[in-house]
């Protein structure tokens, strides 16, 4: 067969197996959808980027939002949703509920018509927040100096946080919108709070969890230390510097944490898994554990070179997990990385892999596997025997108090006693080391209910007071 004939047959094969472009038209959108701003396609074709400027829907001549997608091989399955530019404004169902990903298989048609019922954060119904009472917002606009932007930060405090003087490990997790609250998630929440609260009810120790919202249109940039020719990216190192240099010091200062590396971990999925891998390898002096779910190792081969060149500097535990129904390369890429980690010096006891039969690339998979990953990563701390300490209630006066809080004079104080005053969220407001029972000024506190813990060598006192 001549070269020209071979080339002709190859071209014919491409023509026969590649479907034409597909146009998606939205026949109806919520009434409050702005007509002077685009909507966005976010899905498997563009790395689930909710504000991709190359995937905008604009009004057509019939005043309907429309987008045309490029041709793909016949039989290609794509998943997608529509947004107003971020996952905080992703589409929702008729009652404000989460909806499954939309799907389309190339070759079925050249036009797809759809209806958007509601947008998140537009008052589209729903049952409200599903976050547990021990989940709080640290800040809605925590400043990221390394990137000159702000972000919402969540915190989960163990159920016994306000009733003890314990310090806890900290698990830092990405995509904070999806961890605790179905109302803010874009495809269902991880139920991190429900899972940990259930473990705590069964007397299993649980950590503090800090969730950092992703940046919407900046998510790809922030979760990728290297650039990709198609998707861009590359600000991942600045994002990790924010965690290490700004956020972690703040959390350690304002909450009772076990701040050493042995009690500090990272966890995330997809690109969040990629940045968790990068963070724990680069900052081994800060983190000793990482839960790496459905990692996007495909994004850049630099992750392999970086891991090999950095090597093992400290003991680190890697929990690698994915489903066998994700992309065609996810399982192989994950197993290749596990082998590379072992070759780089990490022991077999430090690197574990888990491939979930039927597991797909979604929050359901990550939610159902979170508990298993947590128990494996934090096993040393969970199984450690806590120091026993007697706890007694203590009344202080006056109560309510205006200016000075007084402690019983008959108490015997030691050289290392400490006093901690905190609010209902568990945030530390006043800490006095080497406390000797002296009057304590509360003039700086706003009116409200506060709690305290007085820690001595053998006895821990706790109580509460009202500030006028």
Image (tube, rainbow, N blue to C red):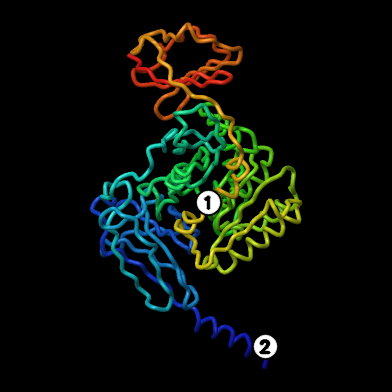
Query: Which is more N-terminal, label 1 or label 2?
Result: 2
Q: Vertical placement of 167 versus 225: above or below?
A: above
| Quadrant of the rendering where the C terminus is positioned | top left
Mark 2 Cα within 10 Å, few/some/many (few <14, many 20+)? few
Q: Is residue 120 left or right of residue 347?
A: left
The residue sitting at 66% across, 41% down in the picture is 283
Q: Is residue 405 left or right of residue 278?
A: left
Q: Which element is circle 2 on? A: helix
Q: Nearer the viewer, residue 178 or 105?
A: 178
Q: Mark 1 points at which residue?
A: 220
Q: Nearer the viewer, residue 9 or 435?
A: 435
Which of the two marks, 2 or 1, is nearer to us in this view? 1
Q: Is residue 215 visible?
A: no
Q: Name the residue under label 2.
A: 3
Count of numbered tags: 2
Q: Position of residue 282 (x, y in %)?
A: 67, 44
Mark 1 Cα within 10 Å, few/some/many (few <14, many 20+)? many
Q: Nearer the viewer, residue 126 or 29?
A: 126
Q: Where is residue 39 in the image (x, y as percent from the top left)?
A: 36, 55
Q: Position of residue 314 (x, y in %)?
A: 72, 42
The residue sitting at 40% across, 55% down in the picture is 187
């Amino acid at each position: 067969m001549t070269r020209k004939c071979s080339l002709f047959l190859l071209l014919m094969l491409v023509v026969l197996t590649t479907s034409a472009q597909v146009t998606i038209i939205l026949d109806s959108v919520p009434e409050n959808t702005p007509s002077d701003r685009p909507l966005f396609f976010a899905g498997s074709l563009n790395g689930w980027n909710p504000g991709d400027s190359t995937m905008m829907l604009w009004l057509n001549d019939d005043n309907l939002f429309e987008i045309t997608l490029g041709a793909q091989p016949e039989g290609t399955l794509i998943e997608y949703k529509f947004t107003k530019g971020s996952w905080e404004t992703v589409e929702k169902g008729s009652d404000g509920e989460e909806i499954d990903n939309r799907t389309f298989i190339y070759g079925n048609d050249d036009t797809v018509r759809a209806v958007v019922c509601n947008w998140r954060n537009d008052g589209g119904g729903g049952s409200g927040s599903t976050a547990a009472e021990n989940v709080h917002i640290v800040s809605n606009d925590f400043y990221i100096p390394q990137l000159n932007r702000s972000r919402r930060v969540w915190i989960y405090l163990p159920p016994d946080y306000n009733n003890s003087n314990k310090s806890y490990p900290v698990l830092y997790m990405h995509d904070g919108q999806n961890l605790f609250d179905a109302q803010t998630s874009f495809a269902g929440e991880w139920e991190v709070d429900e899972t940990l609260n259930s473990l705590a009810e069964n007397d299993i120790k649980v950590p503090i969890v800090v969730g950092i919202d992703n940046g919407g249109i900046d998510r790809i940039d922030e979760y990728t230390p290297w650039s990709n020719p198609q998707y861009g990216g590359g600000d991942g190192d600045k994002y990790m510097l924010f965690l290490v240099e700004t956020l972690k010091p703040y959390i350690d200062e304002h909450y009772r944490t076990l701040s050493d590396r042995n009690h500090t971990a990272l966890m995330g999925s997809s690109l969040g898994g990629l940045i968790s891998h990068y963070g724990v390898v680069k900052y081994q002096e800060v983190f000793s554990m990482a839960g790496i779910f459905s990692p996007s190792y495909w994004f850049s081969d630099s992750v392999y070179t970086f891991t090999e060149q950095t090597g093992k500097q400290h003991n680190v535990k890697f929990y690698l997990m994915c489903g066998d129904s994700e992309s065609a390369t996810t399982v192989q890429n994950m197993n290749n990385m596990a082998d590379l980690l072992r070759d780089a010096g990490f022991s077999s006891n430090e690197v574990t892999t888990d491939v979930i039969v039927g597991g797909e690339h979604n929050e359901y998979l990550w939610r159902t596997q979170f508990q298993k990953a947590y128990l494996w990563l934090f096993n040393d701390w969970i199984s450690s025997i806590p120091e026993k300490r007697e706890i007694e209630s203590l009344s202080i006066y006056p109560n309510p108090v205006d200016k000075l809080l007084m402690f019983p004079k008959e108490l015997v104080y030691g050289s290392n006693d400490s006093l901690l005053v905190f609010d209902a969220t568990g945030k530390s407001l006043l800490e006095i080391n080497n406390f000797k029972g002296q009057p304590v000024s509360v003039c700086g506190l706003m009116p409200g209910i506060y709690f305290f813990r007085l820690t001595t060598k053998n006895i821990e006192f706790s109580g509460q007071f009202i500030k006028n």
